[in-house]
Image (spheres, rainbow, N blue to C red):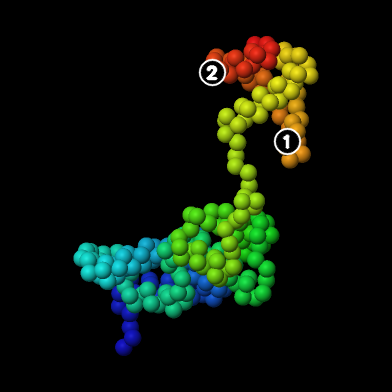
Amino acid sequence: MGMIWSHWDVAFQEGLSAAQGWAAEHGHLLAPTTAVFNGHPTGVWLKNLRTAGRKLAQIEARREAGLPIGSTAGALTEERRDALEAIDPSWCPAWPVAWQRAYRLCRGLITVGAPLPTAPGQTTLQGEDLGAWVQAQRLDWEQLQPAQAWMLENMLHLTPAQPDERPPAPRTQADKWALNIRAAKEFQAREGSLQTVPRKAVVQLSEPDGSQTAVKLGLFVDNCRRRADKLSADRRAELDALGMRW
């Protein structure tokens, strides 16, 4: 007569009710693990069910491919999956939930005609910095799964970052050494040697694009003196040629 006898069924129905309430407040069922609704640990509950849901998806894929499905222990039932999908069809994505949550929030902005943020700090919703997320997707486009890239391109109208939009690559240790040697040569040309470099000395180098790069030459020279026994013979020779005082 409609009675639920299993404690597991009771727990699921309680969790489902909390999930419905949380989704009604937030517009989706992509809750973080910290989410709580009316005292129910909805985020953790959903995390556990996603694990079971992915097990069910694997079983269905193997069955469709005509492969042995193996054990069904730990898999979500189709009935329970359908109940969760009725709340939010994307509740159990194939990629991280945080990614799907940010995507849904961005879709919400587009739906109401709001501009999509493009840089960190421009728009934060439900604790998600959507500008930082958008920027990260464009910069790391090659890391996306094909379905994710399709969603970004066709639903959010995003494209991969162009070369001039990418931050400069971080300098390698060899690059840093070469930059310091440039500064040392400029100082040596002006002062005659590196014997009297003040510890706080800073050399301004002119770059081809007209910009200036500040190099803390005094700190570099001081560090070289402290680490003299760890420098390669070639690097010591470079400094010796500039009149380095060890």
Quarter of the image with the N terminus is bottom left
Q: Quadrant of residue 55?
A: bottom left
Which residue is the site of mark 2?
232
Residue 182, x across and y down, in percent: 68, 26
> Which residue is at 74% across, 23% downward?
186
| Secondary element at tag 1 | loop
Residue 125, x across and y down, in percent: 62, 64
**Which of the pair 77/96 is nearer the observer?**
96
Q: Which mark lies nearer to you, 1 or 2?
A: 1
> Which residue is at 68% across, 15% downward?
242
Tell me which numbered mark, 1 or 2, is placed earlier along the sequence. 1
Q: Quadrant of residue 71?
A: bottom left
Quarter of the image with the C terminus is top right
How many neighbours does mark 2 have within 10 angstroms: few (below 14), some (14-19), or many (20 or more)? Answer: few
Q: Is residue 225 left or right of residue 34?
A: right
Q: Is residue 157 left or right of residue 58?
A: right
The amino acid sitting under disc 2 is Ser
Residue 181, x across and y down, in percent: 66, 24
The amino acid sitting under disc 1 is Glu
Classify 123 as above or below 20: above
> Which residue is at 33% across, 86% downward?
2
Q: Quadrant of residue 219?
A: top right
Residue 17, x across and y down, in percent: 45, 75
Which residue is the site of mark 1?
207
**Which of the pair 11/25 is nearer the observer?**
25
Question: How many labels, in total?
Answer: 2
